[in-house]
Amino acid sequence: MAVYNYDVVVLGSGPAGEGAAMNAAKAGRKVAMVDSRRQVGGNCTHLGTIPSKALRHSVKQIIQFNTNPMFRAIGEPRWFSFPDVLRSAERVIAKQVASRTSYYARNRVDVFFGTGSFEDEQTVSVVCANGAQERLVANQIVIATGSRPYRPVDIDFTHDRIYDSDTILGLTHTPRKIIIYGAGVIGCEYASIFSGLGVLVELVDTRDQLLSFLDSEISQALSYHFSNNNVMVRHTEEYERVEGMEHGVVLHLKSGKKIKGDALLWCNGRTGNTDRLGLENIGVKTNSRGQIDVDEAYRTSVPNIYGAGDVIGWPSLASAAYDQGRSASGSIVENGSWRFVNDVPTGIYTIPEISSLGKNESELTQAKVPYEVGKAFFKGMARAQISDEPVGMLKILFHRETLEVLGVHCFGDQASEIVHIGQAIMNQPGEQNTLKYFVNTTFNYPTMAEAYRVAAYDGLNRLF
Ligand SMILES: Cc1cc2nc3c(=O)[nH]c(=O)nc-3n(C[C@H](O)[C@H](O)[C@H](O)COP(=O)(O)OP(=O)(O)OC[C@H]3O[C@@H](n4cnc5c(N)ncnc54)[C@H](O)[C@@H]3O)c2cc1C
């Protein structure tokens, strides 16, 4: 078996692993990346964020073509199949893999394609797809092996009508009706994708409100748009069993109801990829979801072993994973790049999109903070009218005495971009975080950014 020596070995080439590897390499460390897939990019690029966002983009274009009267001059509304839109996602994945592969080459990070596991606290053995085995010895090791869909043992995921968010990317037809079990972010995003393709969707929510961590006005707006677009949301339901049949699948609910569909997409929970890591050889424990604990330096219970990304749990977002990985390396190389990642915006790519940051109304009310609200509705804004995206709103919550911006909540086209303007102001120190910025600044016209000025005036007008 060949043995290689490194300063840092990173397990997993998703955003967390990439952030860790690049930061260590730029600080002059000799770095190796190990990934069990034959391409870099992680589940983020191959199964999660990138394919779902590319699918959504294609679906949005289809919706525009089918609903904008201008396009009738060139053709009648058309329906595209799920495999049609999947092809465009595959093109994006290939481009992402090409760019990411070049980062490793450019930064002289050696990449090993194989499954890594710990022999001891400084040694990782890698079993490659061809059966060859390598041994990597390192001073520090970063675990960034991500997560996979949680699969309850009583559901037959080998049935050809029962999918999870990984296997749905292998769907070769367009179902007429799909049941989505689990109305978290992934379930809601897929509900938008399928309903945009004209598929009837039954979205089964185990809670009483969609995405209950959101501002309730925005959660209600999403519910309204779902019910307007062939998505039937069923709240406070739990599955009893899933019955896969030749011509359909039936979801039996504990409430006694039964729902029949052509396919079922299971979107309820994820598990950390820790079972093949040989953690028992180094004494690192996992919780019931297969996740590992780290401290603020992203260090596990073993001082030279770090963790970042989905494998450490909250917030399980690619956005945060990259920064966590970079910070884990920052702790190792001590180049001032460490930061504890605890301030992460919400970006939900439903149709329409949702994004938010900071406190919501009920949190501020409970904390007895005297806040005021400023709103801008997209339907009145020139840019939204031009782009024919009138659905949506920007809502700014601010302290009625200090004018400090406390929360930014956005629903509608480009919400996940728009929120970052508010984020920049909220991150200003002291009195520089003020609603006044939005009325004392000239915005390009017409833009969606202008919504900040409109919302700020709306809020200021409420003060007395
Ligand atoms: C459908 C879906 C949509 C999503 N949309 C968004 C979104 O819009 N925005 C967002 O911010 N987040 C989104 N996410 C979440 C995001 O994809 C994850 O947070 C992100 O991928 C986590 O990155 P990571 O680096 O921790 O690991 P991952 O991306 O999970 O990558 C881990 C890598 O480690 C490899 N690996 C596992 N075990 C081993 C081992 N023993 N040895 C070697 N390699 C191993 C895996 O093969 C994988 O390549 C979405 C997730 C899903 C499922």
Image: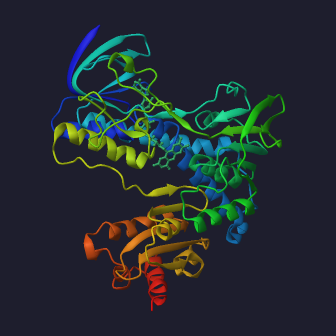
Residue 159 against residue 240 in the figure, above or below: above
Question: Residue visible at 59% across and 52% down?
Answer: 56
Tally of marks? 0
Foreground residue, 411 or 52?
A: 411
Please provide percent x and percent y for residue 463.
45, 88
Q: Residue furthest top?
A: 1
Residue found at x 27% / y 20%: 121
Above or below, comparing residue 378 to residue 315 in the picture: below
Q: Position of residue 448 (x, y in %)?
A: 48, 74
Q: Residue furthest bottom?
A: 464
The answer to whether residue 74 shows anywhere in this view is no
Q: Hey, which quadrant is residue 25 in on the image?
A: top left
Q: Quadrant of residue 145?
A: top left
Residue at x 48% of width, y 40% of height: 93
Report the side of 459 relative to 123 (left or right).
right
Image point (33%, 85%), residue name: 440
Q: Quadrant of the N terminus?
A: top left
Q: Is residue 372 left or right of residue 84?
A: left
Tell me if residue 225 can be seen: yes
Comparing 70 with 250, the one in front is 250
Where residue 457 sits in the image (x, y, percent)?
Answer: 45, 86
Look at the picture and state if 137 lies above or below 295.
Answer: above
Quadrant including the C terminus: bottom left
Q: Residue 123: x percent and y percent?
A: 27, 17
Q: Along the horizontal axis of the image, is 147 left or right of 23?
A: right
Based on the displayed image, in which of its 4 quarters is residue 165 positioned? top right
Q: In the image shown, does 30 or 101 lie closer to the viewer?
A: 30
